[in-house]
């Protein structure tokens, strides 16, 4: 009986843990549907934006910048544009590559921004930046005056671990934990893309909560300066709160099972006691007393 209880307890704890840790995909785009892949996105800047060969391409000349933005406010309540208000870890995963033109091309994954155009001087937010720096250095950057303005480096990824130009291709995963303000970057670089959601090699971590209490509804994929930027296999996910009603129902079922199991041995024990001693012997014993 005790073993049964223990097994049931382990089972429910495992189930609760599984429910609590389950990740929900908020948005996913493989860019396999041509122009239709950009439904819901809004372009900005002055570049040539297209979807071809199963990936998003941003072509740039001179000192132009361009990109596309997605309003994540459309995915509430699963995802909150106030990063600190999300119930669990947020994960952004994407493949990216870039090719320099005459200037040093920069490629940016804008994780969360208050403006559709992250280069506008009034824009604030967080971005993973590559290119347009010394060699292959990358940064997770908190920008205070647009992507081209001032800000603070949250995570500095040295050139030895950063993304170079093609044929190098990067698969990156960025996480934010609303419980402690911790950011993490994971990545793998090679000549082929891999599923970015499966990347597990840490490139760095840092803490910043400067703008996580305000609304940052826009996610963007962008490029800066001459050249071309490529993006593919975007997934944005979040760990939601466990379903309280579902867990309560499971708990109720188990509680009823426990009570039933507790009553059953007592019931059988009484029957065994009654039938194990004949009535005649009980009567004679009472007379002897």
Image: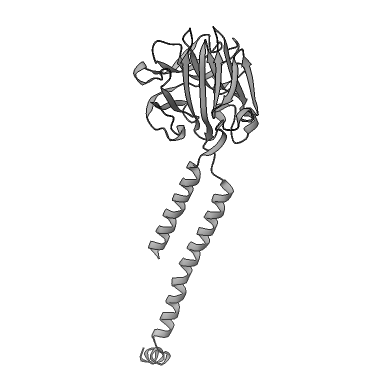
Quadrant in which residue 131 is drawn = top left
Q: Quadrant of the N terminus?
A: bottom left
Residue 215, percent from left and from top: 61, 23
Question: What's the residue at 55%, 25% (across, down)?
Answer: 56
**With respect to residue 279, does 269 lie above or below?**
above
190 in relation to 45, above or below: below
Q: Residue furthest front?
A: 53
Q: Residue at x 48, y 41 (%)?
A: 21
Could you tell me residue 53's position as x and y percent?
A: 54, 28
Residue 184: where, in percent of width, then height? 43, 26
Please state the horizontal and vertical placement of residue 87, each as a whole percent of the image: 54, 35
Total marks shown come to 0
Which quadrant, please, contains the C terminus? Answer: bottom left
- Foreground residue, 233 or 152? 233
Relative depth, front residue between 54 and 29: 54
According to the image, what is the colour scheme of the structure? one colour
Q: Confirm whether residue 215 shows in the render.
A: no
Can you see residue 256? Answer: yes
């Amino acid at each position: 009986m005790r073993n049964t209880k223990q097994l049931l307890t382990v089972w429910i704890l495992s189930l609760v843990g599984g429910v609590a840790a389950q990740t929900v995909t908020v948005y996913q785009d493989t860019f396999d549907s041509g122009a239709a892949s950009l439904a819901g996105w809004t372009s900005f800047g002055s570049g040539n934006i297209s979807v071809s060969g199963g990936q998003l391409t941003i072509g740039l000349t001179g000192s132009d910048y361009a990109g596309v933005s997605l309003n994540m406010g459309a995915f509430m309540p699963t995802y909150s544009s106030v990063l600190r208000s999300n119930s669990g870890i947020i994960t952004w995963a994407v493949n990216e590559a870039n090719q320099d033109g005459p200037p040093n091309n920069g490629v940016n994954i804008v994780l969360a921004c208050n403006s559709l155009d992250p280069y506008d001087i009034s824009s604030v937010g967080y971005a993973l930046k590559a290119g347009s720096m010394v060699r292959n250095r990358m940064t997770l950057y908190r920008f205070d005056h647009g992507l081209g303005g001032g800000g603070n480096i949250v995570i500095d990824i040295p050139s030895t671990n950063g993304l170079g130009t093609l044929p190098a291709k990067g698969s990156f995963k960025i996480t934010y934990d609303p419980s402690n303000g911790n950011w993490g970057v994971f990545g793998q670089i090679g000549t082929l893309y891999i599923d970015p959601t499966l990347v597990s090699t840490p490139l760095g971590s840092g803490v910043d909560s400067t703008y996580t209490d305000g609304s940052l509804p826009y996610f963007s994929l962008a490029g800066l300066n001459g050249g071309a930027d490529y993006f593919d296999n975007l997934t944005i996910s979040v760990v939601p709160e466990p379903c309280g009603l579902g867990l309560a129902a499971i708990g109720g079922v188990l509680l009823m099972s426990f009570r039933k199991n507790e009553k059953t041995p007592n019931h059988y024990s009484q029957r065994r006691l009654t039938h194990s001693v004949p009535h005649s012997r009980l009567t004679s014993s009472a007379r002897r007393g």
